[in-house]
Image (tube, rainbow, N blue to C red):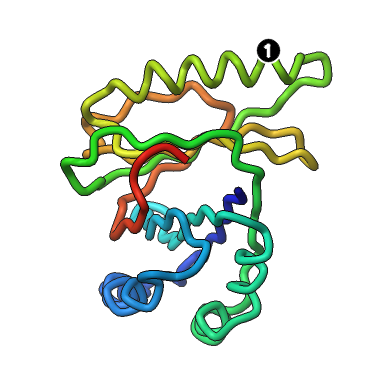
């Protein structure tokens, strides 16, 4: 599986209700999309960033999205954004009884001396423990092997219930909409 995210910094004074309307309209276009396992429509009002996060079942389907009319709509509206991608190591759904309202993307650098197998085992144990939190909706662990960076993406009931992070880099968002298949990935 492949995770992808692009971030669009909105201009000062941009009417953010346009983003909410865009999400309401475009989310329908992604329903039943082949290969799309997860999509979080994320927005940071404080930073004025719109940053959808995707998980695709394989690289070919992610590539197809980047070349099709849905992504051309992003380019036409905003410009062609840089798209980050990561290999998904593991994802898990937590409590599915609520719609998530808050998201956290954490990134940690992996030191050259770190043993990758031990690191992944540690991350898996932490994720297993986290999945029992009744306020967690979704959590994924992904790897950027070019930058040797570990990325965690999590969706929570709300900001107050989210676990605090001690990662090297943390970005928080409001979840405007969520599409996912449920269960473990």
Q: Which residue is drawn at 49% across and 21% down?
A: 166
Q: Residue at x 62, y 28 (%)?
A: 108
**Residue 59: image location, x then y, percent:** 67, 59
Mark 1 crowd level (few <14, some 14–19, many ≥20, 10 Å Cα): few
Residue wearing tag 1: 118
Give the number of callouts. Answer: 1
**Residue 64: image location, x then y, percent:** 63, 73
**Rendered image quadrant of residue 104:** top left
**Residue 26: image location, x then y, percent:** 36, 77
Q: In terms of depth relative to the viewer, which is nearer, 85 or 96?
A: 96
Residue found farthest to the left: 97
Against 86, is 21 above or below? Answer: below
Q: In terms of depth relative to the viewer, which is nearer, 118 or 23?
A: 118
Against 41, is 124 above or below? Answer: above
**Rendered image quadrant of residue 113:** top right
Q: In terms of depth relative to the viewer, which is nearer, 90 or 144?
A: 90
Q: Left or right: where does residue 152 sit relative to residue 64?
A: left
**Residue 156: image location, x then y, percent:** 29, 38
Against 34, is 146 above or below? Answer: above
Q: Left or right: where does residue 112 sit relative to residue 15?
A: right
Q: Left or right: where does residue 72 sit relative to residue 109?
A: left
Name the secondary structure under disc 1: helix
Against 134, is 72 above or below? Answer: below
Q: Residue at x 57, y 14 (%)?
A: 122
Q: Which residue is drawn at 50% across and 64% down?
A: 9
Q: Left or right: where does residue 66 sit relative to residue 131?
A: right
């Amino acid at each position: 599986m492949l995770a992808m995210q692009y971030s669009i910094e909105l201009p000062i004074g941009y009417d953010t209700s346009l983003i909410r309307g865009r999400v309401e309209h475009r989310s329908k276009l992604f329903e039943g999309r082949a290969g799309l396992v997860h999509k979080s429509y994320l927005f940071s009002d404080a930073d004025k960033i719109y940053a959808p996060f995707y998980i695709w079942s394989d690289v070919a389907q992610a590539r197809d999205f980047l070349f099709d009319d849905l992504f051309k709509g992003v380019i036409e509206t905003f410009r062609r954004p840089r798209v980050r991608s990561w290999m998904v190591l593991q994802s898990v759904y937590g409590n599915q009884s609520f719609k998530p309202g808050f998201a956290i993307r954490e990134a940690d650098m992996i030191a050259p001396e770190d043993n990758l197998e031990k690191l992944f085992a540690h991350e898996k144990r932490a994720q297993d423990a986290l999945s029992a939190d009744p306020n967690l909706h979704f959590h994924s662990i992904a790897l950027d092997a070019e930058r040797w960076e570990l990325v965690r993406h999590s969706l929570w009931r709300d900001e107050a219930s989210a676990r605090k992070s001690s990662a090297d880099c943390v970005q928080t968002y409001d979840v405007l909409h969520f599409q996912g298949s449920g269960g473990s990935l």
